[in-house]
Amino acid sequence: MAAVSGLVRRPFRQVSGLLKRRFHRTAPTALQVTVRDAINQGMDEELERDEKVFLLGEEVAQYDGAYKVSRGLWKKYGDKRIIDTPISEMGFAGIAVGAAMAGLRPICEFMTFNFSMQAIDQVINSAAKTYYMSGGLQSVPIVFRGPNGASAGVAAQHSQCFAAWYGHCPGLKVVSPWNSEDAKGLIKSAIRDNNPVVMLENELMYGVPFEFPPEAQSKDFLVPIGKAKIERQGTHITVVSHSRPVGHCLEAAAVLSKEGVECEVINMRTIRPMDMETIEASVMKTNHLVTVEGGWPQFGVGAEICARIMEGPAFNFLDAPAVRVTGADVPMPYAKILEDNSIPQVKDIIFAIKKTLNI
Amino acid sequence: SGLMRAHCSLSLLGSSDPPTLASRVLIASRNFANDATFEIKKCDLHRLEEGPPVTTVLTREDGLKYYRMMQTVRRMELKADQLYKQKIIRGFCHLCDGQEACCVGLEAGINPTDHLITAYRAHGFTFTRGLSVREILAELTGRKGGCAKGKGGSMHMYAKNFYGGNGIVGAQVPLGAGIALACKYNGKDEVCLTLYGDGAANQGQIFEAYNMAALWKLPCIFICENNRYGMGTSVERAAASTDYYKRGDFIPGLRVDGMDILCVREATRFAAAYCRSGKGPILMELQTYRYHGHSMSDPGVSYRTREEIQEVRSKSDPIMLLKDRMVNSNLASVEELKEIDVEVRKEIEDAAQFATADPEPPLEELGYHIYSSDPPFEVRGANQWIKFKSVS
């Protein structure tokens, strides 16, 4: 009775508001999306949004993608926009770059970035350098994407990480997503970018589901290129990583948290242009730095971060030398025990953190 | 006799004097033919039932235009030679004198809305595709008035529907097939002329491009500019098959006399019509010759004889061939063509003056044009304290 008279005494607006609130009381169920589906969604949305966008590569159409990343796209968009190529990396990468020069917006898939080595001249000399060489006349709005780095049991010729090679070159943008949100937001940003963008995906992450925040479900959700994300706040040490190892860093952080060590884990998201500001601000807060990557140590991503830390304001805040955790300096072996020990494991990250903190 | 005296005074006109009204009237009063029909060499054909016509009509207007264009390219290249020897042009400089019928003839066979891409021997094409001698020479001398603002140099000049100027031998061919893909994708009936040399013809990526162009029926005209030498290696020493027009295998081809501008024009018209009809790619081999060595650092006589060069000059020079045809068919007079020579020389001289006097690009712009459409950011210089601003 009291409840009813309570309702009656309120102005109508508030009553209908109450009724509305009742209908929407349940929060939306958290959406789980795999990295593969996130990339698929991103490409689908951009293909729909701009008819100049098209995808080409080996097996991207009728096979639904070698790793099923382009599943359903050929059925939806047809032969004109989803193109199966012969096994001719140098040729089709060049064709993609030429199409971009003429005003289209191609997505050029390399089945893995190992095969991009055949085409690397087109990526660097024809795509990356052209805007500069032409004095700003000729832009190349192209995306090169595909799985990069170590997989599982595919041995030396199929396991190389190209972050350092592509990250070396002015004129290119290089992005490296870790989770689904990264993957969708970055592929969309890459496609909309008027510059050549290399997106280094990870085969082992394709099938991993992540919670998709509501904003990521929008067709205009973009992750900005050139901005890192702090995945976990911490006070004792900064741990910087990109791609799959970000997950390992978070695992290490969880373990260390139980011992009272709080790690700040930074997901780089972009290799070039690198977000040094976020890394420096974090190091100035924590006074310690460990970098983690899957690629080889010499001339790697971590080496660049350490060099830049030394050149900037954060150096004076370091209480210990910056440390790198990387892939082992060997071509990737096949046998499981050897392969497992050729990439950074959670225990290696924990060890490096403890060494840096002198604990 | 009045006519004779006027003729004499015409030929005595110095380079600084523009034609007087009297001399113009004199020229106009001579009855030139409006056009003339010429026989041109039949093209060798590969997988084609019919080729381009063996006769063509040249109008006086077109003839004068082609003559002026070829002469401009010739004098521009010779001026570049001069500037290079004076060390005002640095680095690479690959000249195309001798090959003028190719760039002018190809342009005559297509529309400005068609597309063209070539390798590093590109100055002639840069001109025929629409840039001025001024901005070409200023790019060679590395000045801010250069067409690429001094950032590219000899091998990296771009214009509307002209995609350079490419330094990596062979890489431009897949690019050209990609431009053709865009033409087909956009459905606008445009074609892409994709050029490469006899040396580049052995690059693997060219065969990858042939395959995809044929598979997808791209409107791509592959053009092998065969000047008999890839740097210092003659065609016989580089290719197991020197029938470059057949190297496209499943792609139909034709071999064209690249020293005869009319032959080039007709073949180009034929090839463009073929592509536009949706039949897919076609291949043209232009047989031509370069007077200079491979580049300015190559005298060009260690792998070929001076006699050979001289023979081509005296028997097959493209400008001389056109001039003889025009004069003999009363399409133009010797004096008239000489007048064009004088005008061209002046144009080149002015352009060279500009190219020598224009300042280099400002140092502040070293970091410009890394990315397109981006807000300004910082670019690192030779050490961590030197920073350049990068503006798109």
Image: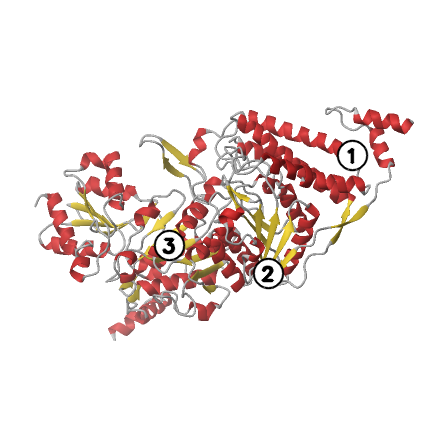
Which of discs 1 and 3 lies nearer the camera? The answer is: 1
* Whole-number angstrom distance, CA of label 2 to CA of label 1: 40 Å
Q: Is residue A11 above or below residue B112?
A: below
Secondary structure beneath dot 3 equals: helix
Percent across and percent down for residue A331 are 24, 53
- A177 left or right, relative to B156: left
> Mark 2 or mark 1: which comes first in sequence?
2
**Observer-nearest residue: A134 or B12?**
B12
Q: Kindly identify which chain the residue marked by label 3 belongs to.
A: A
Residue sitting at the far right: B1
Which mark is drawn over residue B157?
none
Amino acid type assigned to the residue bearing label 1 in the image: Val
**Observer-nearest residue: B158 or B251?**
B251
Instruction: Quickly name the residue at label 3.
Output: A116
Amino acid type assigned to the residue bearing label 2 in the image: Pro
- B270 left or right, relative to A66: right
Instruction: Quickly name the residue at label 2.
Output: B252
Secondary structure beneath dot 1 equals: helix
**Observer-nearest residue: B152 or A173?**
B152
